[in-house]
Image: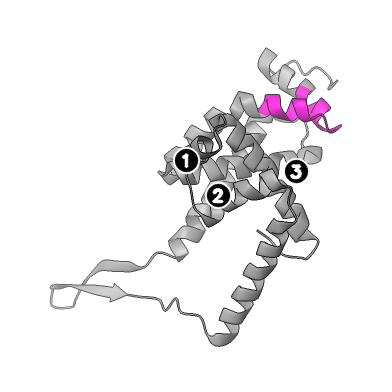
Amino acid sequence: MEDIIPKFSTRAQEDLELVGLAKTGDQAAFGKLMGRYRDSVFFMVLKMVHNRDDADDLTIEAFGKAFNNIGNYSADFAFSTWLFKIATNNSIDFIRKKKLLTTSIDQTIETEDGETNTTISVRDQGLDPEQTMVKEQRAEKIRASVKKLPPKYRELIELRYIEELAYEEIAEKLDVPLGTVKAQLFRAKDMLFQILKTTKEKF
């Protein structure tokens, strides 16, 4: 059990106990922490990205990063503070990457004579042959890694990222609770990440 820290609330003290168990690999402790904060993290992220599917993915990623780095957590701050910081930074990175891929087609500028013109600034998103080949090779490695997953996790990855189904659609298709889909998909992504890491590829 973690040492009692007077400045923390009762809930934060309970979190510390769960973190202590999680550091030993206790999966039930991970589940309780995720159950406590999943909705709060989701709605915070949703306010940042304004898209429920993106918020779902980013919430799962935030928990994944937190759990993968649980050994680095110290009780200088409440676990919830640490988790929300991870989720915030993860969402900011997502927004920045998304902006890089967004083409501005309505940028208005003022000319020297006071008139305004609308310019269209389009970045060439095309890939040269070498880039195309690298992209195809990487996609093939990812497909090969997906095949190494246990059947139920492979199906989840395929439904979510190949067929691009929403979480609700996956739950309906598999006839399982929505919470189960999210929890198992988190596990599936983590397993896939570990497989890809051995080949120095990232999903």
Position of residue 113 measured from the top left corner of the image (x, y, whole percent): 13, 78
Amino acid bearing label 3: Asn
Magenta residues span 18-33
Rounded to the nearest angstrom, the CA distance separating label 2 from label 3 is 24 Å
Is residue 184 left or right of 54 when viewed as pictured? Answer: right
Report if the CB atoms under discs 2 and 1 are less than 8 Å apart. Answer: yes
Between label 3 and label 1, give the one nearer the viewer. 1
Quadrant location, the C terminus: bottom right
- In terms of secondary structure, where does tag 1 sit? helix
**Residue drawn 84% across and 20% down?**
3
- Taking the spot 63% from the left edge, 25% from the top edge, the residue there is 35
**Which of the image's four quarters has the N terminus?**
top right
Q: Main secondary structure of the magenta part?
A: helix
Q: Position of residue 21 (x, y in %)?
A: 82, 26
Res 93 quadrant in image: bottom right
Query: In the figure, 128 relative to 136: above or below?
Result: below
Residue in view at x 71 percent, y 64 percent: 144
Give the spatial CA distance, label 3 vs label 1: 28 Å
**Dot 2 surroundings within 10 Å: few (below 14), some, or many (20 or more)?**
some
Q: Does residue 12 belong to the magenta stretch?
A: no
| 10 Å crowding of disc 1: few (<14), some (14-19), many (20+) | some
Residue under circle 2? 159
Read off the residue under disc 3.
68
Of badges 2 and 3, the one in the foreground is: 2
The location of residue 34, given as percent across then percent down, is 65, 29
- The quarter of the picture where residue 2 lies is top right
Instruction: Decide if residue 112 is on the left or right side of residue 175.
Output: left
- Classify residue 103 as left or right of residue 165: left
Mark 1 belongs to which amino acid? Glu
Q: Residue furthest top?
A: 10
Residue highlighted by disc 1: 169
